[in-house]
Amino acid sequence: MGDYILRSNAMEHTAHEERLRGACREFVTGKGAVRTKLDLMVDGRDLSGLFCEVLRESGFTETTVANVKVLAGERVPAFFLDGSVAYFGWVFWEKFTEHRMRKLWGSVVRNAKGDWSIQIPEGKRLMIYADSSSKIEMDMEKPE
């Protein structure tokens, strides 16, 4: 009887872990979940490690904004982890004038003024997870 309970608990634990992994995967890929901001604390447990595993499995690599290869008019999907909170955003070139631009990561979460809530400029050494193979074109006049 006790052996059955242990096997049953192990199966429940495995199923729960797979549900958590699946939820992380949905957020990372944007399939089944909107990629914005995700609190990785679940039932008092920090799932940041699991989330980073899913990022790597999904083609995202740990890097800095400076090391992301992106041209003006392109953007690369990327995540920034702030403690146990994951933010989705893009690495791109922000255009101020015809001759003045800056490369940055900007969160899709916006502040009250409509700007990116979190911005990481090229000169900051903060780590992000980017997927350069999923680079897409963007309108530099209206960055999202």
Image: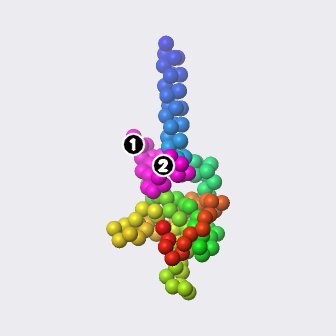
Relative to 59, is 40 on the left or the right? Answer: left
Q: Position of residue 75 (x, y in %)?
A: 58, 67
Does 34 sit above or below residue 70?
above
In terms of secondary structure, where does tag 2 sit? Answer: loop
In terms of secondary structure, where does tag 1 sit? Answer: loop
Residue 122 visible, this angle: no
Q: Position of residue 97 (x, y in %)?
A: 51, 85
Furthest toward the left, the residue is 112
Q: Which residues are magenta?
A: 28-48
Does 52 sit above or below residue 133?
above
Residue at position x 48%, y 19% in the image: 5
Q: Nearer the viewer, mark 1 or mark 2?
A: 2
Residue at position x 40%, y 65% in the image: 110
Does 11 sit above or below residue 28?
above
Furthest toward the top, the residue is 1
Q: CA distance from mark 1 to mark 2?
A: 22 Å
Sooner in the amino-acid sequence: mark 1 or mark 2: 2
Q: Please name whichever residue, 5 or 113, is drawn nearer the observer in this view of the structure.
A: 113
Label 1 CA crowd tier, 10 Å (few <14, some 14–19, many 20+): few
Residue assigned mark 1: 44
Q: Please name whichever residue, 90 or 142, is drawn nearer the observer in this view of the structure.
A: 142
Q: Position of residue 22 (x, y in %)?
A: 53, 41
Numbered tag placed on residue 99 in the rendering: none
Q: Position of residue 27 (x, y in %)?
A: 50, 50
Residue at position x 49%, y 16% in the image: 2
Find out whether residue 41 is within the magenta segment: yes
Label 2 CA crowd tier, 10 Å (few <14, some 14–19, many 20+): few
Residue assigned mark 2: 33
Residue 137 placement: quadrant: bottom right
Amino acid type of the residue tagged 2 in the rendering: Ala
Find out whether residue 7 is within the magenta segment: no
Residue at position x 37%, y 67% in the image: 111
